[in-house]
């Protein structure tokens, strides 16, 4: 499957669908979202210093397509197109279908329009879940700062694993590590994965992954759980690499344990409200 992401697509209009009920706390919106949404939300940390970033997003979509999934790419990175000026009118109409397996939403700066009094932009994810009910996977491609606001919470439930993007150049690796540091310290997201864009012959790829993993453990108390290397020059029509296929299958694992973990906290809060 070959999918080319538009550089500046002419989108019509977007919808904003917000919950009418006030959240019980900062984490409540995300608990409800992850408990009921069919789609898997995957935070992908944008990296403006990385070459072939769009190609890596295409490879991720191809990996999910192999598993029969339709992927919505929310492109809110630093270099993404701005959303349509009618973004808060009809979000669903702004989602462009690129292929049978992939949809695309230009969203640079859009999450901030949903910020609440606690600084969270979880409302944007809720709106996306309503606007794209047919999506199996939602790749949220955004800066580490935006991802902190989107996925921030105070409780250890339904925590997604951010996917860091980098190539084998120092400036790109430095940016990826900085993103991990921000997500760990501000967003409380301690477990990460890495997608490294590098040729198979790159002498630095494995060393970069090991260095990021070591620094995460030594200095951040974080974990690099998995990493994969993808050749940006490879034929996009070929099958996903074994590492990418493994990561995709792991990402698609059911969230039953996450939902179950959220129930005690929700029940405790409900009892507190009754008392």
Image (cartoon, rainbow, N blue to C red):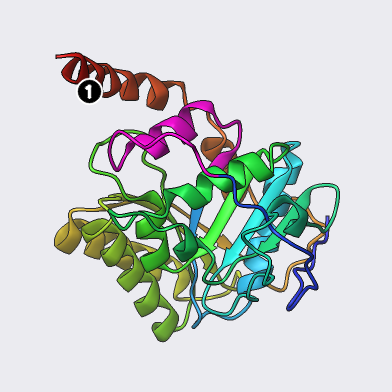
Q: Is residue 94 left or right of residue 218?
A: right
The residue depicted at 52 percent of the width and 37 percent of the height is 250
Question: Residue 10 in the image: x percent, y percent?
Answer: 80, 73
Does residue 265 sit above or below 119 in this rendering? above
Specify whether residue 227 is painted magenta: no
Nearer to us in this view, 221 or 114? 114
The residue depicted at 75 percent of the width and 68 percent of the height is 5
Q: What residue range appears in magenta? A: 18-42
Q: Is residue 101 left or right of residue 14?
A: right
The residue depicted at 33 percent of the width and 25 percent of the height is 262
Residues packed near mark 1 inside 10 Å, few (<14), some (14 to 19) or many (20 plus)? some
The number of discs equals 1
Q: Which residue position is annotated with label 1?
A: 269
* Element carrying mark 1: helix
Question: Residue 76 in the image: x percent, y percent?
Answer: 55, 67
Q: Is residue 123 left or right of residue 248?
A: left
Does residue 118 sit above or below 75 in this rendering? above
Q: Give the quarter of the image for residue 249.
A: top right
Question: Residue 175 in the image: x percent, y percent?
Answer: 38, 77
Nearer to us in this view, 274 or 211? 274
The residue depicted at 31 percent of the width and 58 percent of the height is 119
Specify whether residue 34 is painted magenta: yes
Question: Residue 115 in the image: x percent, y percent?
Answer: 40, 58
Q: Give the quarter of the image for residue 218.
A: bottom left
The answer to whether residue 240 is visible is no
Give the quadrant of the N terminus.
bottom right
The answer to whether residue 129 is visible is yes
Give the quadrant of the C terminus.
top left
Nearer to us in this view, 168 or 98? 98
């Amino acid at each position: 499957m070959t999918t080319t992401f538009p550089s500046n697509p002419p989108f019509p209009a977007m919808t904003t669908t917000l919950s009418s009920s006030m959240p019980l706390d900062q984490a409540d919106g995300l608990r409800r979202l992850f408990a009921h949404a069919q789609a898997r939300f995957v935070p992908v940390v944008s990296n403006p210093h990385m070459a072939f970033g769009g190609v890596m997003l295409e490879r991720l979509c191809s990996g999910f397509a192999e598993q029969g999934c339709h992927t919505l790419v929310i492109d809110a990175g630093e270099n993404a197109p701005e959303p349509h000026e009618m973004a808060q009118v009809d979000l669903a109409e702004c989602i462009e279908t690129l292929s049978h397996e992939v949809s695309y939403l230009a969203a640079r700066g859009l999450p901030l329009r949903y910020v609440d009094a606690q600084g969270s932009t979880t409302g944007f994810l809720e709106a996306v879940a309503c606007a794209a009910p047919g999506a199996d996977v939602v790749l949220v491609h955004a800066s580490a700062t935006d991802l902190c606001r989107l996925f921030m919470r105070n409780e250890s439930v339904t925590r997604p694993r951010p996917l860091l993007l980098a190539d084998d150049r120092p400036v790109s690796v430095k940016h990826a590590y900085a993103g991990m540091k921000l997500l760990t310290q501000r967003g409380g997201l301690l477990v990460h994965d890495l997608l490294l864009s590098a040729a198979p012959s790159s002498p630095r790829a494995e060393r970069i992954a090991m260095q990021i993993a070591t620094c995460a453990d030594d200095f951040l108390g974080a974990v690099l759980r998995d990493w994969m290397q993808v050749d940006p020059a490879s034929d996009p029509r070929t099958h996903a690499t074994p590492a990418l296929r493994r990561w995709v299958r792991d990402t698609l694992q059911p969230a039953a344990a996450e939902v179950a973990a959220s129930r005690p906290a929700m029940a405790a809060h409900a009892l507190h409200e009754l008392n």
